Amino acid sequence: MDLRVEANADNLRALLDWMKLDTHAVPADRLRRASLAARLVGTPGRFEIGGLDLRVDTSRLSGAVAYVDRGRPAFGARLELDRLNLDAYLPPETGAAPTPAAQPAPSGQPQRPAQKAGRAAARQPEEPASLRLLKSVDANLDLTVSQLTVRGLPVQGIRLDATVAGGGVTIREARIDDFIGLKGRLDGQVAAVWPLRGANLALTAEAANLSSLPSAVAWPPGIPAPERLGAVTARARVAGDAERLAVEVNAGIADATLEAGGALLALETDPAADLKLRLTHPEIGRAAALFGDGQPARAYGPLDLYAELRGPRKMPVLGNIQGIVAGVPLRGRANANLTGSRPRVEADLQTGDLDIARLAAAPALASRVGAAGPAAGQGAGQGSAPAAAPAADTPARFDLGWMRSFDGRLALTPASLVIGDTRIDEPALRATLENGVLKLEEFDGSWAGGQVWASGKLVAAEGAAPAMDGTVTVGKARLDQLAGLSGLGFAGGSADLEATLATTGDSGDALLRGLTGKGRVAARDGLLTGLDFAAIRDRLTRIDRPQEVLGAIAGGLQGGQTRFGRLDGTFTVRNGVARTEDTRAVTDFGEAAVVGQVSLPQGTVDARMRVTIAADPPLPPLSLRVSGPLAAPTRSLEMQELQDYFARRAGEALKPSLPVPNLQGVPANPEGLIRGLIDGLKR
């Protein structure tokens, strides 16, 4: 046969209704007109439709189709579609009624056969009807779609060149030039689609930015806004079957690179992974800033991390973790449980030296032209103004909402923990996170020749400022390390400290200013530096005049020290200010009592040490005042009591040396009295 076909319909909907085809689901403004032109050549078992020109409403499909039946239907098609707004032909979206969930069998009752069968069916899903059709025909398809609109999303430049034969697929080219900023290409072959067998596919994808992606898919909470992630690239290759599909992936996003290699297992029953991963980033500070609220990125250092991902998709295990994070070596393992209503993550990590002060004081990185930021990738007309930079003196606010997004457990063992001048060696930390409450179950380590222990919790309740409370215990530490917190001069010996503290605040400054609590300190066999009680006692007992007091005390303050057997005291903390009223040190040569306070928010000290020297006769106390910045306080002497004491003693020593006038026989009149006094002084 050789037929030329031409047809026109000015009311396509009426024609379809006449043909008893249901068109009610198609909006009324569609299916208005259509036209068809084609040439049919061949026989019933082998024919070709050439010169195809089909127009429906505003869309045009052109090309050719061939059919041959060799006992198995086979098609060949080369088609071009200029545009298709699929949304215009789809019914409006309506909320689907939820499917009633199967009720579990009551406790203690055996499951019915239907329940068991349903569970088995879930583990071994049936072959989709579309794939059964794929096995029944062979086809060659060369399709080009210039523009397609689906659910309001435009897709540009669709190209498919593929062959289907015997249930297998060969994809010479599957390409999309632009889908919400993404473009990608897929090629390769699959020997059987169901069950998956003999797959060998290669995929490439890239996007200048992902700012339009949330219009197509729901963006996960807790993930940086897509416009901040910058350019994205991905290359992947898979080979194998459903039981074991070899995978090789290389992806880049936000300057980070992810490499993955290994296998995906049991894809059609209980999917699992056996992958080796490597994640790198030239500056982890830039990556961390993506999760922040506009604060400048900090220079922490590079990221280079290797790990092995194994296990089912609901309970993955990340093992053999090793690498460098912000210049700190890291190794360990982690696992997740995604079967519950809230994810649970557990990790056991070991690191090198953790210098918290270095990380906290990391310098800000210079912004880069074209770098991904809050406004990067936004289209014109979005009207998003860049976020205002926070004032330099505004304390950084804590955003602890992430603590309510999952539960977990952490075991962390660094080589050391460094905070400023404080170094804790071989610390061990055990913590749990449950329902927004971070509990420090155990923390201990070696510090200043002794041990330090701590426990407590941090509560991040929604709508409230973070609240913290805990206890700290120090045992047998070097006294000079604890003394550095007071601004006073102590050395040698060992010290114990106990403190119970609590605070509330949404920034580091607020936490310090809200700190309250109490504690005690005790020390044994130490030294009071800058005071030589024995020298002061010896010098003071040898002087007679008040003007010699300063020289005597100065001699006891020139590099001197006094050994004490016991030091005890308690302190209270209120609004970040620690105060003591009863701290005392007892020595063989006297006693020192300390009264004063340390302001943690301001970093200042104001304390007075009252020194009582053991001497015979007793000497009044000497006061040493320490005030100013905690790192470099000023020391001053208060000697008024000593000076008054020696002035009185000098006055008393002068009284016996003055002549006492003899007033016997002196007349009572004034002139005689004055003359008698003068005569008495002459004798």
Image: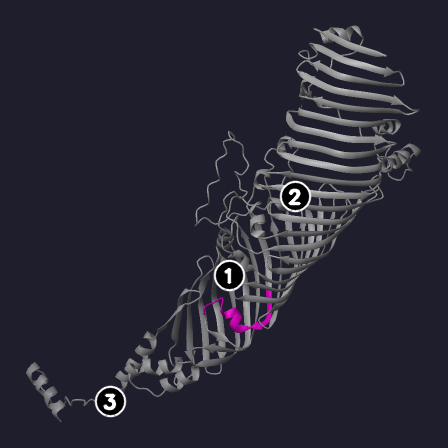
In percent of the image, x 42 and y 72: which residue is there? Answer: 609
Residue 103, position in %: x, y? 83, 32
**Location of residue 495 in the rendering, given as x and y in whole percent from the top left corner:** 56, 72
- Rounded to the nearest whole Å, what is the CA distance between mark 2 and mark 3? 89 Å
* Magenta region, residue range: 473-487
Q: Is residue 78 above or below residue 111?
A: above
Amino acid beneath label 3: Pro
Seen at 52% across and 69% down, the residue is 482
Asked which secondary structure carries label 1, the reply is strand
Quarter occupied by the N terminus:
top right
Residue 341: x and y, percent? 72, 40
Residue 145 on image: x %, y %: 69, 25
Q: Identify residue for label 2.
A: 405
Any magenta on residue 484?
Answer: yes
Residue hosting label 1: 572
Numbered label attached to residue 656: 3
Disc 2 crowd rating (10 Å Cα; few below 14, some 14-19, many 20+) is some
Dot 2: element: loop
**Tag 1: residue type?**
Thr
Other-residue count near label 3 (Cα within 10 Å), few / some / many at <14 / 14–19 / ≥20:
few
Quadrant position of residue 414: bottom right
Relative to 506, 454 lies left or right: right
- Residue 462 shown in magenta: no
State the image quarter where residue 218 is shown: top right
